[in-house]
């Protein structure tokens, strides 16, 4: 079955999953994100896939970023270890994310991924995420806070503290499934109004059905 065409729009947050990952690519991600005008808000590098939440400034930005990452590291590894072939499995999957609570839900989904996978007991114990930047206020060379995150407080410490309190509330199984199905299907993540607006802008269907809206900052099981 053919994959649905991906919907991309400038200045709309995008949750991305790319199968296969390499743990030494963060520096290149930072360079390419700046080159292609993508602001990275959250990330998690797992053993077989990578999660990113980013906002591209142009429609082509996210695609160029992911293409550049794949090309640079395939070339590097093929030179370092005499080999041929790819390191990345297929095209990346993505969903456009509605501003507001859905953005924060994606932050939490991404940074809690190692905990859900049973790899660590606490998200701060996993090195390859944006948790320390977003929940602890540590400086980062390329993590850029989304406007919704910035609304959590008036300064770095206050925002980190507010985000940490939200992060401690578990995402509901229904919302986790909504994020997964939207991303895997290249649908939008948001409510019906958002889906209608994006469908009108892109001229195509962008959702499987009516999506609910999570209550403000209360996404508990």
Image: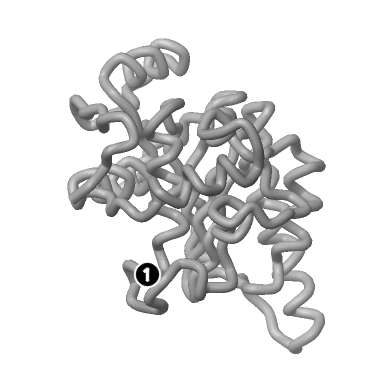
Q: Is residue 195 above or below residue 28?
A: above
In the image, 3 versus 177, the foreground residue is 177
Residue 89 vs residue 189, the one in the foreground: 189
Task: Return the x and y of residue 197 as percentages of the image width and height.
Answer: 39, 13
Question: Residue at position x 26%, y 30% from top?
Answer: 215
Query: Considering the numbered disc 1 on the image, is that residue within a helix, a strand or a loop?
Result: helix
Give the residue furthest to the bottom.
Answer: 82
Crowd band around label 1 with a 10 angstrom C-alpha radius: few (<14), some (14–19), many (20+): some
- Compared to residue 213, the image places residue 70 above or below, namely below
Q: Which residue is the site of mark 1?
A: 115
Q: Position of residue 166 (x, y in %)?
A: 38, 46
Please state the total of marks drawn on the protein image.
1
The quarter of the displayed image where residue 175 is located: top left
Residue 143 point in image, percent of width and height: 67, 48
Image quadrant assignment for residue 34: top right
Look at 77% across and 62% down and name the residue there.
27
| Colour option used | one colour
Position of 61 with respect to 49 (left or right) is right
Q: Position of residue 127 (x, y in %)?
A: 58, 72
Name the residue located 49 percent from the left edge and 75 percent from the top edge: 47
Between 198 and 42, the one lying in front of the other is: 42
Residue in the picture at 68% in, 57% down: 138
In the displayed structure image, the side of residue 36 where residue 180 appears, left or right: left
């Amino acid at each position: 079955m053919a994959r649905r065409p991906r919907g991309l729009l400038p200045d709309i947050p995008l949750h991305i999953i790319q199968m296969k990952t390499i743990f030494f690519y963060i520096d290149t991600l930072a360079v390419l994100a700046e080159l292609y005008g993508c602001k990275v808000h959250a990330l998690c590098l797992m053993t077989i896939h990578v999660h990113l939440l980013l906002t591209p400034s142009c429609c082509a930005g996210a695609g160029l970023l992911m293409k550049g990452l794949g090309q640079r590291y395939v070339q590097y590894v093929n030179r370092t270890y005499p080999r041929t072939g790819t390191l990345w499995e297929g095209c990346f999957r993505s969903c456009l994310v509605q501003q507001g609570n859905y953005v924060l839900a994606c932050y939490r989904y991404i940074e809690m991924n190692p905990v859900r996978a049973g790899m660590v007991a606490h998200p701060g114990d996993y090195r390859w995420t944006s948790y320390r930047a977003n929940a602890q206020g540590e400086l980062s060379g390329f993590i850029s806070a989304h406007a919704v995150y910035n609304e959590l407080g008036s300064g770095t410490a206050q925002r980190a503290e507010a985000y940490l309190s939200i992060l401690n509330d578990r995402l509901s199984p229904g919302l986790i499934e909504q994020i997964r199905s939207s991303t895997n299907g290249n649908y939008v993540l948001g409510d019906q109004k958002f889906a209608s607006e994006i469908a009108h802008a892109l001229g195509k269907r962008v959702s499987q059905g009516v999506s609910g809206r999570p209550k403000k900052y209360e996404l508990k099981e």
